[in-house]
Amino acid sequence: MAMSQAHRPSALKQQNKKHRTLGHRSKGSIAKTNRGRVSAKNLSKKIKFELSREQRKNRAKQIRAAKKEETAFRKRSLGTQYNPPFLVTVVPLSPSINPRTVLVALGECDEGATVCTSPQGITHISSQRFKQRFSFVIPPANDLYAILDSVKTTDTLLLLWPGEEELGGDADLLLSSIMAQGLPTPVHVVTDLEELAQKKKHQVKQNLIKEIETRFPGPAKLHTVEKPQDALLILRHIGAQKQRPIFFRDNRPHIMAEKLEFLPEGSTGTLRVHGYLRGKPLSINGLVHIPGWGEFQMSRISIYHLDPYPLDQRCKEGDMIDAEIKLLSEADPDVQEPLTSTNEVDPMEGEQTWPTEEELAEAEKLTAPKTLTKRVPKGTSDYQAAWIIDSDNEEGSVGDDEDEDDGDNSNMEEYAPVDAMSQDGCEEDGNDEDEESEEEEEYETVTVTENEGANYDEKVDYGEEMDALQKMREAREDAVFPDEVDTPQDVAARIRFQKYRGLQSFRTSVWDPNENLPLDYSRIFQFEDFHRTRKRVLRDETHGAEPGGYLMIDVKEVPHHLYKEHVATHSPLVVFGLLPHEQKMSVVNLVIKSHPQGHFRPIKSKERLIFHVGFRRFANCPIFSEHSTGNKHKFARYFHPGSTVVATMFAPITYSPASVLVFRQRGDGAQDLVATGFLLSVDPKRIVTKRVVLSGHPFKVNRKTAVVRYMFFNREDVMWFKPVELRTKWGRRGHIKEPLGTHGHMKCFFDGQLKSQDTVLLHLYKRMFPKWTMDPFVARPPPLYTFHSAHNADSDDDDEDEEERQQPLRKKSKMVKFFS
């Protein structure tokens, strides 16, 4: 019986895709299959509650209401009766502007306002119309540090713009520094418009508005003080505008000193600071920092029972209301934060234990010289006996008397030339003294007459100019040929570069951050996780004096000379409370960007610069590196204009974010703003590697093989650096195969055809560490402006105005004269 065969479709028949069951299962079918079973992975996850549409809308409404309440609370926390007044810093942008005239207009615009002056020259205006209080600080207009210290704690910055006068370079420096440090809420006022025509006034205002819009964020609003209504509008604007947040100010307690007292105790003393506490609560067991002075401890905190400058009571002329002072807290020595900033270094900490007497005796036996017994002719010395070949059958010894005689004679012959040399040295010293005396006599007899040409040469330091020229040439060479170094011919390369190593990949190769650390790293403090510690410190609540009260704090062990210098400068004093660990030293990394105004020539690494980091200022010599990702960062020999680098140095711990200003001091003491930036991290494990590139040239090329010369000059160096990978400027990679001859030629193999005009490179790396060059005391720069009277210099009235312009509101008698 014949079997029937099934039909077989041809290759041209259409083949439909199979239905994938798992990919198209519905939720219901999956639920039926599982029968209520849930995987362990889903059970381990946190249960998420999905909100409905109405619930999401209600939640957004609650968040919006909470933010509105927070904003309203911030507004109510300034200027009211039970809160500190608005702190306003008045900064004129021209030496021809007198800030006192603006302050007089603000005090006279409200008839019911109360005007008082603190002993430190801070003017308090209490307005009954707005139910708000204002404190106006006028730092010395030509003192950059005084203005920056005042702006650190201020709520509003009142900038006085000149009418027709253009801004100079000093005003640009001042505005750039304020913007980089942290700009408070600005208020712009134009002065000296009374004598201009109406059309000219409008043109001047429009030009100033354009200037303000280019420099400041947001829409520009320009005020005048021609009428009392204009001054009243300025007060309303200060009290109603939104305050700009500044992290290092808002998250720390700070006080602007209203009154200072110094109780001397020898070379140091106790500084009593009176003023309103702003920001966060101040703990008596914490530390305080005074910019330019350093860190100090407090002994007690007292609070005024009544506000010396109240809202609903009129002050006497220039006098504070007598109020009862109540002791709030005293320091506990057992709990108080110490001033220790560095670790105590124990040089024997990493050493081994001292060996025992048995180990020392065994070591002496091993290191003792071996004695051989030889038979030599009589009268033979030790030197002659060493050259005599030993005989197996002959044994003997050398007489001791002969050896001793020979040793004595040899010692006499050895020591005789030393005496002669010492005598010759004495004679030479005597001759040198005679020559020096003759030179001194010659210098005493020479007289120099003054001449215009000779004076020019005396004023110019050509040695400094040649040093600057050499630095510029080195910086230009580093920019054109980065990291390329010529191999020395007088020193072996394996000795010259013995601290360097080769890396297979700069990005992925492993480098232990705790390897071969210098001794200074044992003096610093390191966080296990800096960002986690920062979050915890900022989240923890501080118990102490609450902000808003008028306090008197006693700062102990303050050097007397610092207080004398402060009194001579007539600058405002600012006190900041420190967060935990901020007095300790560590490795701080700052991102700094070149500033076009003052950075006009390259800055070499380890050059002395002045840093303003948050509320601190100090001098240091940092090392520069590239601002890049990864765990290794390339060392930068120069900080070139227009670039951005990371400055690494030993400095006190500061929690980010914090603004950074970098100044470079000139020979005459003036300071140029060379860079601005921010605090990157506090991390001693950040690896900064210095790269050195050794270059060689192909001598003979045979496809992928080439003979390279001029990279090394002896065979041993080629063998030493044989494991390091080679690279070329055209992207080839290779390795050293074998040395050729004894003059440094080597046979190399590459991954592709090598061009004869290509250059062979060998990259070596070494870790760089900063030096301990921290200097907390920085000299103040010279005055910004050179004041010249804008009116008749021969007039006594103008001289009086000029003197008042140079010394802003300081004394009570002057304020009484203005407001009487």
Image (cartoon, grey):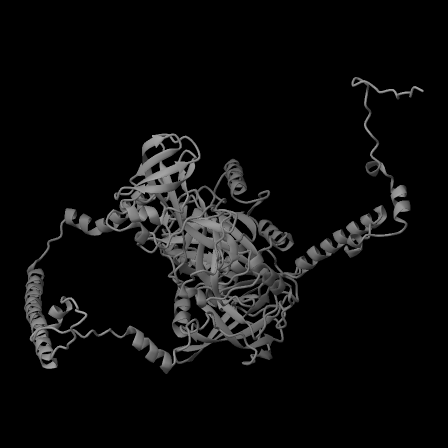
- In this view, 582 is above or below 67: below
Where does the image place residue 440, in percent across and percent down from the top left?
A: 9, 63
Asked whether the viewer can see residue 96, the reply is no
For residue 718, side relative to residue 551 (left or right): left
**Between residues 252 and 742, which one lies in front from this camera angle?**
742
Indicate the position of residue 604 as horizontal and vertical percent values: 36, 50
Nearer-the-camera pick, 46 or 95 = 46
Q: Is residue 525 above or below residue 182?
A: below
Q: Is residue 356 left or right of residue 392?
A: right
On screen, residue 634 above or below 12: below
In the rendered image, which quarter is residue 124 located in?
A: bottom right
The foreground one among 753 and 189 is: 753
Please, which residue is most extreme toward the front here? 393
Measured from the top left, where is residue 571 in percent x and y?
A: 44, 63
Q: Residue at the right extreme?
A: 1
Closer to the camera, 702 or 421?
702
Q: Residue at left 84%, top 20%? A: 8
Residue 423 location in percent, x, y?
A: 6, 71
Q: Is residue 425 visible?
A: yes
